[in-house]
Image (cartoon, helix red, strand yellow):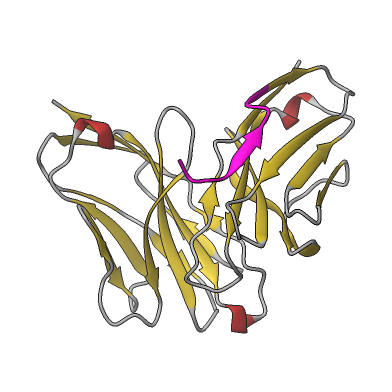
Amino acid sequence: AQKITQTQPGMFVQEKEAVTLDCTYDTSDPSYGLFWYKQPSSGEMIFLIYQGSYDQQNATEGRYSLNFQKARKSANLVISASQLGDSAMYFCAMRPSVSSGSARQLTFGSGTQLTVLP
Amino acid sequence: DSGVTQTPKHLITATGQRVTLRCSPRSGDLSVYWYQQSLDQGLQFLIQYYNGEERAKGNILERFSAQQFPDLHSELNLSSLELGDSALYFCASSATDSLSYEQYFGPGTRLTVT
């Protein structure tokens, strides 16, 4: 079984500063994918970034980067130069590989509510 | 805009009733997933269809059922509704089952059971 843990229910960051949202995971699957999604107050789920467990480099997408530490089973999201529009709930999620035989759905953490202060 | 559409956006109904939520995946996506987001349970996977066939089941109640039609749209049927079924229901789609293919979420249907 897979489990995602996000230990920060809420975070505050000053506009233009960087912020790290924590995510740890637990799985027995040999390969897996890690995802981050953003959910603004309007409710939609927006895909941000993906990291494969065998990827050699940490994923980056614009102002988003994923600090992947496989040995520690952590996949923290780093947002650089925070903007007011970044205020939202952020979810870390995991998905097993096809070869593991497990279903391919996402398992989500409980989320972190990020508030960017002007 | 993710390209995934869900209707209706909001639904208010009474306990004991039955409702149908509809989802159209992104063009070309074969896989459809349904998730439930509630305050107490968080985001939970319900069921997945791939090219018309059920692929995986999660924490889906027996009162709930789903199907994916030949045109790849999907419907989630919720019956004998209870107050606890009030939640945001998301549909997501992905091109294939491959690991790296992200799931694109629709805007959700907010169900309120009174």
Q: How many marks?
A: 0
* Dominant SS type (magenta): loop
Judging depth in this view, the residue of B42 and B104 nearest the camera is: B104
Q: Residue at x 34, y 66 (%)?
A: A74
Can residue B42 be spotted in the picture? no
Q: Is residue A57 above or below residue A85?
A: below
Residue B73 percent location from the top left of the image: 73, 49
Image x and y of residue A116, in percent? 21, 32
Magenta run includes residue A81: no
Specify whether A3 is left or right of A114.
Answer: right
Query: What span is colored magenta in the figure?
Result: B1-10
**Which residue corresponds to the image point at 79% horizontal and 61% vertical from the top-left?**
B52
The answer, for residue B36, to whether it is visible in the render is yes
Of the 4 image quadrants, the one containing the C terminus of chain A is: top left
Q: Nearer the viewer, residue B28 or B63?
A: B28
B44 on left or right of A43:
right
Q: In the image, what residue occupies the spot 26% across and 71% down?
A: A58
x%, y% of residue A64? Answer: 24, 55
Side of A31 relative to B68 (left or right) = left
- Image quarter for residue B72? bottom right
Task: Find out whether residue B3 is within the magenta segment.
Answer: yes
Q: Position of residue B22 (x, y in %)?
A: 73, 38
Q: Image quadrant of residue A66?
A: bottom left
The quadrant the N terminus of chain A occupies is bottom right
